[in-house]
C-alpha cells in the first residue's frame, strides 16, 4: 500500500493545484497575521475559512483524482495487488498531500510570526487537527460518490451537493428547527444534531476552545459543559474519527464489488 | 490452464455473459473474436478479476481465481486504452510497475525494440496515442509470465511497430506461453492465431482452428467466415 500511496502522493504533489492550494494558505496566513497583528483574531478568521474551504477543496480533489486516474487504476488492478490496497493507497495519498498543503501553508507564517512562544499554540494545533480531519473525511466521502457514479459530471454534481448540504443547507435546516421548536428544551437535540455534521462539529469544537462560548447563551453553556471537558473533547474527536472510518470502510466494500 | 465454467455477467439489465464455458490449454495463440459488444473484454476482465461475475467459476492453473490477487503475478495484461497519469514520465511509470511486481524484467530490450529511448524522460501526457501504446506494450511484455492477455494490441501502431509486435508474440509463443488476443483485424488473426474462440450472445459460439472455421462456414477467406458467423446473430 505504501508504494501506491507514494505514487499518488507524488503525482498530486507535482500537480499545479497542490501548489496553488499551498500558496493560498501561505498568503492567507501571512496576510492575516501581519496585517491583523492579533493571533486570536487571526485564528478565528482562519477557522471560518478552513471550515468551509477545506471540505470543498477536499471534495473536489477527491472526485477529480478518482476520475482522472481511472485508467491508471485499471492498470493497477491488472497487477498482483489487492483491491483494497489500491484504493486505500490512493485515498491516503490525496488526504495526506492536502493536509500537508494546509499544515505547511499555515504553519510557515505562524512559525515566522513567533507562534511557538505564544499561548495560542494549542488553539492553532487544534485548528490544524480539525483541518486534517476535514480533509480525511471529505476525501473519503468524495471517493465514495465517485466510486458509485460512473458519469463524471454527475459525480461532480453529487459531490458539490454533498458539500453544499453539509456546509450550508444543514445549518439552515438546523436553525429553522431551532426556531420552530423554540418552546422545547433543545440543548441535547442541538448537541446530537451537531455530531451528525462534521463541519458543525469542527466549528463548535474550535469556537469553544477559543473561549467565546459566552456569546452562545444557555445552549453555549451546555456545549461548554460538554465540549469543555476532556470527555467532550475525546468524544468529539471520536465522532470525527468515525466520520473517517465509516466512509473508508464503505470505500473498501464498494471497491471490492465494483466492475472496472 | 484456464477453465471457465458457467460464467454469468449482467450490467444492469444487459446480459453480457450468459453461461459461458471455456477451456484453454497451455501454449499457443488464441484469438478471442466476436462482434462489438459481444463480451470479449468482459470475459478477459473477469479472468483478470477486474469485473466480478454474477455466477460461475474461473480457475487458472487449477486454482480458483475469484477474489484472489496473487495469481496476477503470473499473467501480463495489455489494456485496450492506454491512458497513464499525465504527470509521470515514461521511465518513472516503468520503474513504478517494476516496483509493484517483484519479478525479473527486460524492459531495456523492449525500449530499444520500440525505439522509445528518446521518450523516456517525456511526460506521458505529451505522448501521441501510438507512442503510449508502445509504452503499454513494454509494460506488458517486460515480465516473464505464463499467460499474456492482449486487448486490441494493434491500436495506433505504425507498420514497423506492428512487425515488432508480431515478432514478440511469436517469440513468447515459442517459449510455450499462452497468449489471448482480442482484435478486429482479421489479417492479424489469420497470420498469428492458432485457435479461434468466437463469442456470440454471451456464449462461446465457435472454438477451433482457423481451418475448421473455414470449412464449417464454407468460406476460404477468414474475414468472410467471421462475417458469416456474425450475420447469423441477426438471422
Image: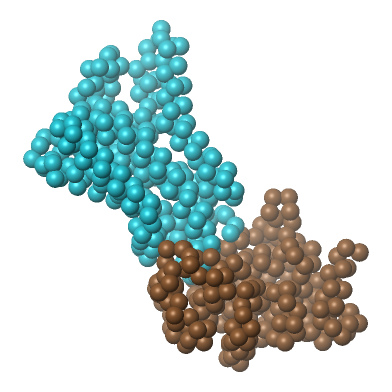
Chain colours: A cyan, B brown
Residue positioned 53% across, 56% down in the render: A256
Residue A204, percent across and down? 30, 27
Residue A187, percent across and down? 34, 17
Q: Residue furthest top?
A: A183
For the residue pair A82 and A2, the one nearer the viewer reads as A2
Q: Is residue A12 visible?
A: no
Q: Is residue A250 left or right of residue A54?
A: right
Q: Quadrant of the C terminus of chain B?
A: bottom right
Q: Is residue B68 left or right of residue A111?
A: right
Q: Is residue A51 left or right of residue B105?
A: left
Residue B108 higher or lower than B17, as above or below: below
Residue A104 higher or lower than A80, as above or below: above
For the residue pair A175 and B159, the one nearer the viewer reads as B159
For the residue pair A80 and A62, the one nearer the viewer reads as A62
Q: Disc count in the image? A: 0
Residue positioned 37% across, 34% down in the render: A52
Residue A43, percent across and down? 22, 33
Residue positioned 85% across, 78% down in the render: B225
Q: Is residue A121 visible?
A: yes
Toward which corner of the image does residue A259 lie, by quadrant? bottom right
Residue B195 higher or lower than B151, as above or below: below
Q: Quadrant of the N terminus of chain B?
A: bottom right
Residue A126, percent across and down? 23, 38
Amino acid at each position: 500500500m505504501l508504494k501506491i500511496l507514494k505514487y499518488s502522493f507524488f503525482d498530486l504533489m507535482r500537480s499545479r493545484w497542490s501548489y496553488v492550494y499551498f500558496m493560498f494558505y501561505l498568503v492567507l496566513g501571512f496576510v492575516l497575521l501581519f496585517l491583523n497583528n492579533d493571533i486570536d483574531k487571526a485564528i478565528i478568521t482562519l477557522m471560518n475559512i478552513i471550515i468551509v474551504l477545506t471540505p470543498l477543496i477536499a471534495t473536489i480533489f477527491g472526485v477529480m483524482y478518482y476520475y482522472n486516474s481511472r485508467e491508471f487504476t485499471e492498470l493497477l488492478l491488472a497487477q498482483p495487488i489487492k483491491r483494497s490496497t489500491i484504493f486505500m493507497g490512493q485515498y491516503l495519498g490525496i488526504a495526506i498531500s492536502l493536509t500537508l498543503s494546509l499544515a505547511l501553508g499555515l504553519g510557515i507564517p505562524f512559525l515566522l510570526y513567533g507562534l511557538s512562544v505564544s499561548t495560542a499554540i494549542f488553539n492553532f494545533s487544534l485548528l490544524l487537527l480539525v483541518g486534517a480531519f476535514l480533509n480525511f473525511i471529505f476525501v473519503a466521502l468524495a471517493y465514495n460518490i465517485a466510486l458509485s457514479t460512473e458519469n463524471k459530471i454527475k459525480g461532480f454534481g453529487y459531490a458539490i451537493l454533498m458539500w453544499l448540504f453539509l456546509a450550508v443547507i444543514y445549518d439552515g435546516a438546523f436553525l429553522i428547527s431551532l426556531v420552530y421548536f423554540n418552546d422545547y428544551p433543545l440543548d441535547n437535540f442541538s448537541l446530537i444534531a451537531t455530531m451528525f455534521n462534521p463541519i458543525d462539529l469542527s466549528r463548535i469544537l474550535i469556537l469553544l476552545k477559543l473561549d467565546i462560548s459566552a456569546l452562545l447563551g444557555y445552549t453555549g453553556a451546555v456545549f461548554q459543559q460538554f465540549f469543555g471537558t476532556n470527555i467532550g473533547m475525546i468524544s468529539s474527536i471520536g465522532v470525527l474519527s468515525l466520520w473517517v472510518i465509516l466512509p473508508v470502510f464503505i470505500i473498501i466494500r464498494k471497491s471490492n464489488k465494483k466492475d472496472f | 490452464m484456464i477453465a471457465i465454467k458457467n460464467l454469468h455477467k449482467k450490467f444492469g439489465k444487459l446480459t453480457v455473459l450468459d453461461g459461458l464455458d471455456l477451456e484453454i490449454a497451455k501454449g499457443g495463440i488464441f484469438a478471442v473474436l466476436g462482434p462489438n459488444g459481444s463480451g470479449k473484454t468482459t470475459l478477459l476482465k473477469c479472468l483478470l478479476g477486474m469485473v466480478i461475475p454474477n455466477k460461475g467459476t474461473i480457475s487458472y492453473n487449477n486454482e480458483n481465481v475469484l477474489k484472489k490477487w496473487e495469481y496476477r503475478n503470473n499473467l501480463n495484461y495489455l489494456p485496450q486504452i492506454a491512458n497513464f497519469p499525465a504527470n509521470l514520465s515514461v521511465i518513472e511509470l516503468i520503474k513504478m510497475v517494476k516496483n509493484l511486481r517483484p519479478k525479473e524484467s527486460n524492459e531495456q530490450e523492449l525500449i530499444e525494440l520500440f525505439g522509445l529511448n528518446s521518450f523516456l524522460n517525456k511526460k506521458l501526457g505529451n505522448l501521441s496515442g501510438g507512442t503510449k501504446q508502445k509504452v503499454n506494450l513494454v509494460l506488458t511484455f517486460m515480465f516473464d509470465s505464463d499467460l499474456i492477455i492482449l486487448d486490441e494490441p494493434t491500436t495506433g501502431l505504425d507498420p514497423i511497430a506492428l512487425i515488432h509486435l508480431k515478432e514478440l508474440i511469436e517469440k513468447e509463443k515459442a517459449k510455450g506461453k499462452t497468449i489471448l488476443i482480442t482484435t478486429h483485424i482479421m489479417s492479424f488473426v489469420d497470420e498469428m492465431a492458432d485457435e479461434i474462440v468466437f463469442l456470440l450472445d454471451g456464449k462461446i459460439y465457435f472454438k477451433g482452428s482457423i481451418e475448421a472455421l473455414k470449412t464449417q462456414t464454407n468460406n476460404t477467406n477468414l474475414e468472410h467466415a467471421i462475417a458469416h458467423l456474425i450475420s447469423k446473430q441477426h438471422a
